[in-house]
């Protein structure tokens, strides 16, 4: 039995609702969805306030699960707080941009100079900036479904229209190229790919990337590639940047240190322009203006980029056999597929899995309700699939960052819950 909301809580909610009503009157947030931190998370917070312990499998932040930032990175950050000038060029400090430029060279991303690199307060800030600079009212941009929902939210908030193309579970969650083709109109300006993917954990092979590039070439689309998990690839596979396959196109590649260096809260990200910058001259001018308007990204954060990208990569220990992320991935994949009514593709990268629920078996019509019911009964929190702009109520995302013993407990709870669940 869950305690009812306190009078104070009820009041806060009323204020919140009033504020939302004021917002939505302006229609500004009507088409913006961000359920990764939505109603199910609100309910978990309410339960915690009532003293309950919740296992949070909803947010991809490694720090609470015992993954710590590499020592040398912490040392650099401390040093920068003491010694840095506390301000930088709007694109970022020299050493950071140089290191990112060299990283782009290692990944064979063509024609990247120091001027093509922008640091940001996480990749998130730059995704928003990139969408604001690109989209006029009604302009369309192709975004994967499922997606990391910030992309859709930022595209819509910028006044554009996020048009979702399907990623196909039956084909290891690769983008469905026919669906992409079908959804291109004369208002389509760009295509977004998330590779490696959140929430599916997919890693796209070169052939798929080449075909996406070919489609972009034929329809004169810009390519935005979110590669924040490119250093978290397992099974000996190699990540390839789509920009390296498209020197004749204009590509924007996003990455950062939140995931590979376990420092989400330090807010360190970047974006790189490459390829045919001539065709994107106006766009680049717009980005420069917006970048100047936000002054600069946080300087202590930037100061760790050079150290982080060079030399020994501690993240590599986690993603090989015996490493935590690798072993936890194997565990969660097997455990989920062992539960009657659940199936999941094996993730190849990042730390997410996007299982399918047999909606007929459990009569599920709302995945949010499913997540809420599981949370209330078993005190385990995950994000329903529709939070990732997935069109059916038949998926959910699990973050498999906790130790295997904790994941095992969560999977036992899910199995027990589904033995009787019927919506
Ligand atoms: N892109 C993807 C695909 C993500 O999963 C995330 C965070 O979860 C981000 C971008 C945001 O990263 P940052 O912490 O650099 O803002």
Image (spheres, rainbow, N blue to C red):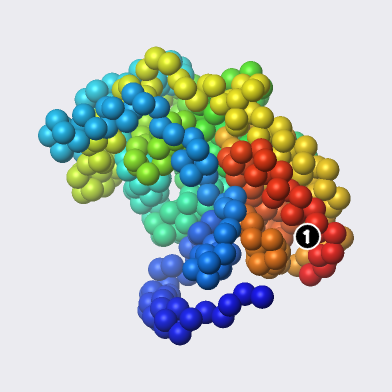
For image coordinates 40% across by 68% down, the residue present is: 28
Name the residue at 56% across, 80% down: 4
Residue lying at 58% horizontally and 77% vertically, measured from the top left: 3
> Which quadrant does the C terminus fall into?
bottom right
- Eyeballing the image, is 33 above or below 68? below
Residue picked out by circle 1? 417
Q: Quadrant of the N terminus?
A: bottom right
Residue 367 visible in the snapshot: no
| Mark 1 residue element | helix
Quadrant in the rendering for residue 39: bottom right
- Relative vertical location of residue 89 with respect to residue 139 in this rendering, above or below: above
* Percent position of residue 350, x then y: 57, 35
* Pointer 1 local density, CA inside 10 Å: few below 14, some 14–19, many at least 20: some
Looking at the image, residue 231 sits to the left or right of residue 103; the answer is right
Task: Please name the residue shown 84% across and 52% down the image.
Answer: 341
Quick check: can you spot residue 131?
yes
**Coordinates of residue 342 in the picture (x, y in percent):** 80, 49
The answer to which of 370 and 50 lies nearer the viewer is 50
Q: Where 170 falls versus 277 (above or below)?
A: below
Q: Residue furthest front?
A: 51
Q: Position of residue 195 (x, y in %)?
A: 56, 34
| Residue 242 in picture, x, y percent from top left | 52, 27
**Left or right: 414 in relation to 64:** right
């Amino acid at each position: 039995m869950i305690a009812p909301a306190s009078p104070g809580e009820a009041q806060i909610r009323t204020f919140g609702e009033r504020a939302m009503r004021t917002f939505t009157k302006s229609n500004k947030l009507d088409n913006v969805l961000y359920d990764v931190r939505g109603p199910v998370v609100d309910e978990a917070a309410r339960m915690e306030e009532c003293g309950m312990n919740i296992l949070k499998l909803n947010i991809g932040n490694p720090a609470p699960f015992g993954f710590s930032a590499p020592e040398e990175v912490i040392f650099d950050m401390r040093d920068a707080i003491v010694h840095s000038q506390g301000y930088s060029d709007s694109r970022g400090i020299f050493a950071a941009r140089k290191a990112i430029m060299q990283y782009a060279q290692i990944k064979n991303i063509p024609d990247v100079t120091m001027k093509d690199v922008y640091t940001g307060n996480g990749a998130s800030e730059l995704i928003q900036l990139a969408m604001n600079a690109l989209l006029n009212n009604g302009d369309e941009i192709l975004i994967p479904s499922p997606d990391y929902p910030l992309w859709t939210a930022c595209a819509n908030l910028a006044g554009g229209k996020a048009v979702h193309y399907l990623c196909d579970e039956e084909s290891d969650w690769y983008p469905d190229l026919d669906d992409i083709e079908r959804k291109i109109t004369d208002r389509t300006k760009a295509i977004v790919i998330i590779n490696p993917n959140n929430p599916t954990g997919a890693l796209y092979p070169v052939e798929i990337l080449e075909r996406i590039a070919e489609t972009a070439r034929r329809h004169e689309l810009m390519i935005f590639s979110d590669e924040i998990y490119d250093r978290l690839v397992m099974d000996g596979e190699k990540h390839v940047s789509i920009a390296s396959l498209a020197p004749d196109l204009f590509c924007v590649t996003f990455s950062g240190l939140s995931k590979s260096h376990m420092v989400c809260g330090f807010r360190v990200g970047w974006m790189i322009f490459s390829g045919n910058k001539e065709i994107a001259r106006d766009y680049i001018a717009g980005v420069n203006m917006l970048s100047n308007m936000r002054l600069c990204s946080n300087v202590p954060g930037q100061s760790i980029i050079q150290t982080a990208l060079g030399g020994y990569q501690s993240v590599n220990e986690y993603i090989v056999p015996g490493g935590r992320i690798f072993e936890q991935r194997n565990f969660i994949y097997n455990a989920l597929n062992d539960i009657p009514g659940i199936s999941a593709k094996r993730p190849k990268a990042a730390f997410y899995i996007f299982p399918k629920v047999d909606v007929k078996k459990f009569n599920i019509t709302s995945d949010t309700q499913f997540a809420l019911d599981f949370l209330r009964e078993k005190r385990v929190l995950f994000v329903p699939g529709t939070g990732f702009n997935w069109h059916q109520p038949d998926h959910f995302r699990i973050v498999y960052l906790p130790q295997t013993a904790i994941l095992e407990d969560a999977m036992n709870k899910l199995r027990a819950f589904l033995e009787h669940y019927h919506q």
